Image (tube, coloured by chain):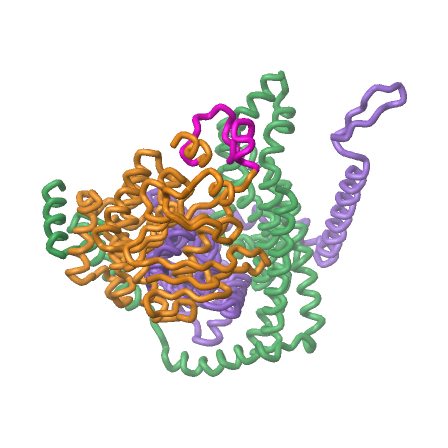
Chain colours: A purple, B green, C orange
Amino acid sequence: MPVSTSIDGLPLWQRRTSRAQWLRFGGWLAGTCLFLLCWKVISDNTMWVFALDAGRQGSDLISRMLPPRWEYASNLWQPMWDTLNIATLGTALGILMAFPVAFLAARNTTPHPLVRSLALTVIVSSRSINSLIWAMLLVTIVGPGVLAGIIAIALRSIGFVGKLLYEAIEEIHPTPVEAISATGASRLQVMNYGVLPQILPAFAGISVYRWDINIRESTVLGLVGAGGIGLALNASINSLAWSQVSVIFAMIFATVLISEWISARVRHAMI
Amino acid sequence: MRADNQARLSAARRGQWRKPVFIERQWLRVALGVGALAYLALALGSVEVNWARVAEGAGRGLNFLAAFTHPDFVSRQGDILAGLLESLTMTLTSTVIGVLLAIPVGLGAARNVAPLPVYALCRAIIAVSRTFQEIIIAILFVVMFGFGPLAGMLTLAFATVGFMAKLLAEDIEDLDARQVEAVRATGAGWWQVMNHAVQPQVMPRLIGLSMYRLDINFRESSVIGIVGAGGIGATLNTSLSRYEYSTSAAILLIIIAIVLASEYASSHVRRFTQ
Amino acid sequence: MLTLAGVGKRYPTGDRALSDIELTLPKGQVLALIGPSGAGKSTLIRCVNRLVEPTQGSIRLGDHELTTLSGAGLRRARRSMGMIFQEYALVDRLTVMENVLSGRLGYVGFWRSFLRRYPTDAVREAFRLLERVGLAHAIDKRADALSGGQRQRVGIARALLQSPRLLLVDEPTASLDPKTSRQIMRLIRELCAERELAAIINIHDVALAQQFADRIVGLNAGRIVFDGAPGELTAETLTTIYGEEEWDTRDGEPEEHEAPGAAPRAESPTLRVATS
């Protein structure tokens, strides 16, 4: 606590030393300058005439969205079913692939440091790339449709599930693992008896959590042609059928809320 | 249950033992199993696969993978740099603005500090922001604000508000009530309570979460360009649709590198603030 | 039966945990290993079943050299050495029966163990052992539902299901109350006698060691400084094992940061010797 003595001999208290004070001030100054600079770049690239028009455009948009054309909802059951399948099958496939990767990436279960860095690379690449980019890629490879969506979701899930899972594996108690090794168990048996029971609750929680996120992500994959309700959204936007768009939005909103509720319930039940 | 246990014990004495089943009620176990199988069959049945198209694309997939061995940073250098600059600026400004806006919304969404009408309003904002994918918001903002990074930045800021405010509200809701009471007992007003009791408790996590969100915003900024909201996504989209895989590979590698760097940096910042 | 010759262990950090350990353990002998914390007791027994790799010397079990084993050979050697741990080291989320059966892992293939389809005689033996340690009624309970003493019994049953020739016991009573500690030590002692098992028991508690072991080995700073019968343990030998300072200041400066005036624990060796 920086306390100095004033001229008349009384102790003076300040929250920070003057050096810390200056460092803080400098940090804030630099941060603000950086922010302003970034703002300038954005501002230079913006057509302010259009931007200033946003209020009118927005109210115009809302007036065209309302009232929603509810009859259109009957066309959405099939795309919605596809969306659910993309999310669910994609999550399942992703988990299947993430499981071994996590064991290879955890410090205490990896067979070799080289394998570990390879597994970490897989996890990082999968995490860094948005599922929409994976979908764009896969559409050019396997063609438009649900399959591309499923694989895209799966590829994106590997990184997420893999990362959380390998962190869980690194946090297990080491003594049961030691005890199982001491019985003369093989490597796989040690995983099965010593490691697996300890990470199972975390694993189930992570999977359900990712499924919930994947529902949300799979609603937009159709924008790049990878199936699901996003296809209908894209078509409606392109034909400027805004009253259909609002129906789709309502549908997505409801689905995501329900899946979030389910996921929270399941995770709660598991703890 | 008791008799059942006796039966299991005498079976074990004879050397017969099976792992106890996870779900005890047999009908439920069967129903869940059958249900899962039926869903799987239906879902897999509704996936249409055009195998001829897949076979045709497989070669393209291999080309794409091969492109990672010789990424081409040079031939679209200008586009890449411009896109990257836009992405980075969007990331930074949107995170700053988003976090600043998230603080009042988060306070409003915490039941223990906000009155009911404010609480309901803030929770509604959070729900809308979290439910819709960034890209959907981006489409609307592009219609309203025109093409370019401004729409992208606003999208990311809006998404940041939902994300940060929810976590912040949860933090405030389970903060240590004794400290708040202690400060309130000194006769402090609402603002003073916030400043002396609430802020010190939530600040470290707020900084950590902001760093995390910065990272997410960068990743998101690489896709919203697809719908015209600026950033590296547009460049990537173009290169993919032109089958210029070496350029796409270069862009993806850059994205991965930046995400890695920011993760590394944020882990340091978090250690520093704790 | 077990012979250690010139065994040493140096950690990669440069710390020397063990040097020149010479030890021969005949069949059926229960050996208590005592010494201050950090003397290398745990390291020594972990070197025997290679949970820790010794850096020099040779360890022979019967006719087999253990230090050069790897893969299947190491697994076979490990299954003939049962280990019992301080914190019981049970897998919490598995049932008692699964924990005991895991002692058989060295004998069954992966898929059999994965599907929990153990051979009939293994299950029968597991049940008999659980009856012997008084826990047959709890076979389907989860391990984390048991008390400390009960868990240690499960740990003992697991080690015995390996049909070991040697027991390695690491601080079996450190987490237990005095009464349960004695019960557990007595159980280990009886089981060793029943099956003619040799055992190395790491133990902090000199009183328990004197009461239940055939032979006591004192370890200090990684070296054997005492080796003899429990009766030969005197105040001077305890000084060589645990060091000088602690004896001189036995009133003013209780070891292990006990509060002054706290009831003397059996673990404090001076007091024990003084009263016996």
Residue B101 lies in what quarter of the image? top right
Is A268 magenta? The answer is no
Q: What residue sits 28% from the left and 63% below the top?
A: B40
Residue C276 position in % (x across, y down): 38, 32
Where does the N terminus of chain C fall, quadrant-wise? Answer: bottom left
Magenta range: C245-267
Question: Is A111 positioned to the left or the right of B85 in the image?
Answer: left
Residue C180 lies in what quarter of the image? top left
Seen in the picture, residue C34 relative to A133 is either above or below; the reply is above
Residue C244 in sight in this render = yes
What secondary structure is the magenta-colored segment mainly?
loop
Residue A72 lies in what quarter of the image? bottom left
Residue C174 position in % (x across, y down): 39, 41
- Furthest-right residue in view? A7
Q: What residue sits 62% from the left and 75% below the top?
A: B247
Q: Nearer the viewer, residue A151 or A11?
A: A11
Tally of marks: 0
Residue C31 position in % (x across, y down): 36, 50
Is C247 magenta? The answer is yes
Q: Nearer the viewer, residue A127 or B200?
A: B200
